[in-house]
Image: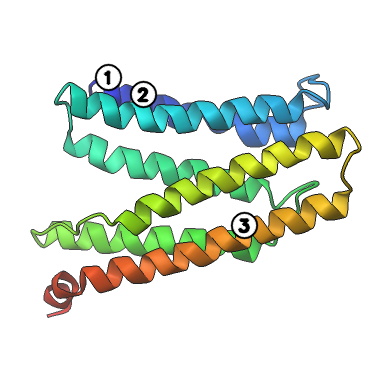
Amino acid sequence: MNIANYITLLRILIIPFFPLIYLKYNFFKIPLFWMPIILLGILIFCEITDLVDGLWARWKNQVTDLGKVMDPMADSITHILVFFTFTQSWIDIPILLVFVFLYREFLISTLRTICALRGFSLAARRSGKIKTLLQAIVAILIVVLMIPFIMGYISLETLRVTSLILVSIAAIYSVISAVDYVYANRSYLKRFFL
């Protein structure tokens, strides 16, 4: 463990507050107006720490195998937890869209793990980084949309339809990035299946 890994761990520990506050803001006596602002703060904090832990590890030459595993795991936990949360209450996206994210993460993680056990590592792809960035942007945009909804400037239908479109775009790109990942690493995967 080093500072970069502790920063990543902090992100994993902070993100469970997102569904708690979204679903139970009354229990915590959080005024409705402040709820999306607090959620936005949690998301921005998680995304900034995602950037900081990588920069810190490279700057201090503290890139570790643990960090290489923890960082994408923290990304997956963060975004999948947020999208699962959005299947509830106002946003109400179909849970099948979240299964697309889950399937992609399980597929790629399993392929990486099995190949690592066979002695070779699968290279990360730019499409995977774009996928992570797109998921972060979509999550932040949906929370930002909650503010005018709560203030009465947009309808529940507008909030739900816009959220559905945004999450669908992220889900479609997740599939594209998975295909790109498998195709780019096909020579390694052939060795795995032989």
For the residues labelled 2 and 1, say whether their Cβ atoms are less than 8 Å apart. Answer: yes
Nearest to viewer (mark 3 / mark 1) = 3
* Residue type at numbered disc 1: Ile
Distance, label 2 to label 1, CA atoms, is 6 Å
Q: Residue 160: where, in percent of width, then height?
A: 78, 54
- Crowding near the residue tagged with mark 3, few <14, some 14–19, many ≥20 C-alpha atoms within 10 Å: many
Which quarter of the rendered picture does the N terminus lie within?
Answer: top left
Q: Earlier in the sequence, mark 3 or mark 1?
A: 1
Alpha-carbon neighbours of circle 1 within 10 Å: few (<14), some, or many (≥20)? Answer: few
Q: What residue type is labelled 3?
A: Val
Q: Residue 166's quadrant in the figure?
A: bottom right
**How far apart are labels 3 and 2 at the CA level?**
27 Å
Name the disc covering residue 7, or none. Answer: 2
Q: x%, y% of residue 135?
A: 52, 49
Name the residue: 77% across, 39% down: 146
Name the image quarter holding residue 59.
top left
Q: Which mark is residue 3?
A: 1
Residue at (74%, 41%) from the top-left corner?
A: 145
User: Which residue is denoted by mark 3 in the rendering?
Assistant: 167
